[in-house]
Image (spheres, helix red, strand yellow):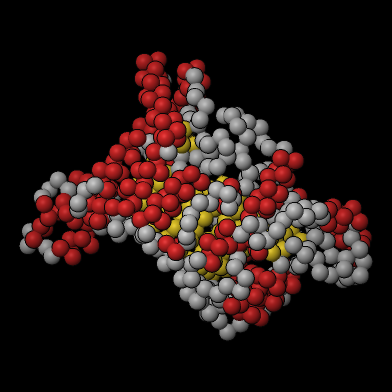
Amino acid sequence: MPFGNLPTELLSEMVSHLGAADLRNLRLVNKKLSAIASRLVMKRITFAMCKQDFDMLLSIADHPVYSEYVSTLVYNADVMRLDRANLALFRANIQNTSRIDKKLNLQALEVSDDIIEERYRQYNRLFDEQQDILANNTNFAVLKHAVSKFSNLREIVVCCGGEMGSHRRADRVLLYSYQLTSEGMTDGTGAARHLESLLQAVEAADTKLDRVRAGKMHVSFFDPLRFELQSLEFLSNVTIFDIVIQVIQPPPGLYSDEPSMNTVQKQIRDCRKVMAKGTLRRVLDSMPHLVSLRLIVEEDHSFDYDAFRGPVLWDHIMPEGKVWPRLKNFSLGDIETDRDQLVAFLVKHKDTLVTLEMEYMRLKSTSWMKLLPQLRKGFRGSPAKKIVFSRVLIGASEDDGHPPEQWLLGNPDIDREPHPLEVRINEYLNCSGPKKGCPLRVDNMWGYDEDDWSDVHGSDGDNQDSAVDGDDNGDWISHFDGEDEDEDVA
């Protein structure tokens, strides 16, 4: 039987495994294959904040057939920096990129004067177009029109183009010359404008979304003065909510120094004030059908994380007493809570949870060495779970004489194998593996020194009544004093 005579359902399954370039070629074969390929090509539309992509988006939206195929919009949050680069800086960046490519055995960008000048003219044209979009809020108007035409839209994604691998080779002259960046907005808002315009368009079209994903969203997005949505009803069907919140605003300029400790401390304090207003908490409360929830807070600084309070508190984001009956996947990063609060939530969801991931988690005044046995007891009898505790766990001792808690765990982004302590935590909470006590102990904390511990507690390390060095304990307490006076959990 000729390939084109196969049943449509079988053809659709076969061509669904092709890449985007092959699907575009397949559309040229005949009408039947063109219809099948178009449905797959148009299912997920990736675009950026530029005139060319907006024209493409409007063309698809106004097409009587293709507009029906769109179910996912991926908004590339990379923008050009708002300070225009001169030719000398542009040339230097391209030359530097070319040298790096050669060292990495990549195809290097050509750096002849004629090519650089042509690229610079292209850069200026794109820069002017972006300025016009920002000045006239063109992105809001374009998305309101386009989304109103996408009757089957179910998912919106805001991301950095580099993460999605969506940049064409021609764009690398901008991307790698450090002119195109997700942090291009000099007010530090990152991708907030992109998500704001998408959500406003979805609300205006009364579209019921199923999935919302957004990365590197600056915390200012959740300021009630900025969050202009009239209703959250359009989020009531959402089953997957995945967001990364950026706390620290990068300093302006191409080659800025790291922010100072005072700057980091102020911006964390500002973050707490914004999040305490409860915008994100109300968003989550409007999603009764969540199956997957991922909330990651990124501080992006080079200081020790235990030098500061957590930028976001549990009470800021979690609706009180909330239970999601279908919740299977739960991931948190850099949230400050206490053990009774965290354990109560997890035990309520023990029968549905399949995956539990936590990174850079902080207990304000309670101990991880107390939390894990309490959670193990609460999980007993529930289905086995994939449990990943990674990067850093920070806590406070509940036993006299114990030091402040901090364990350094693995980094899933770069580790080839799970960290041994991560494995033991998983086994312990699932009541599997060797029958041993709590895997988190004083002697495997970061910075533990057996001699120092013996000097204070005796050679067996069991003297719970002795005090640790007063300066260390005082420093720990000082991080948590006097920073919440002006916070109000709405």
Q: Residue at x 67, y 36 (%)?
A: 258
Q: Nearer the viewer, residue 310 or 322?
A: 322
Q: Residue 98, percent across and down?
A: 45, 26
Q: Nearer the viewer, residue 11 or 152?
A: 152
Q: Residue at x 45, y 45 (%)?
A: 194
Q: Residue 319, percent across and down?
A: 59, 68
Is residue 130 shown to the viewer in this render?
no
Q: Residue at x 81, y 53 (%)?
A: 482
Say if 190 sits above or below 132 in the image. below
Say if 464 sits above or below 164 in the image. below
Say if 108 sits above or below 305 in the image. above
User: In the picture provided, is 187 more to the left or to the right than 167?
Assistant: right
Quadrant assignment for the C terminus: bottom right
Is residue 36 shown to the viewer in this render?
yes
User: In the picture provided, is 424 more to the left or to the right than 364?
Assistant: left
Q: Residue furthest bottom?
A: 381
Q: Residue 378, percent across and down?
A: 64, 80
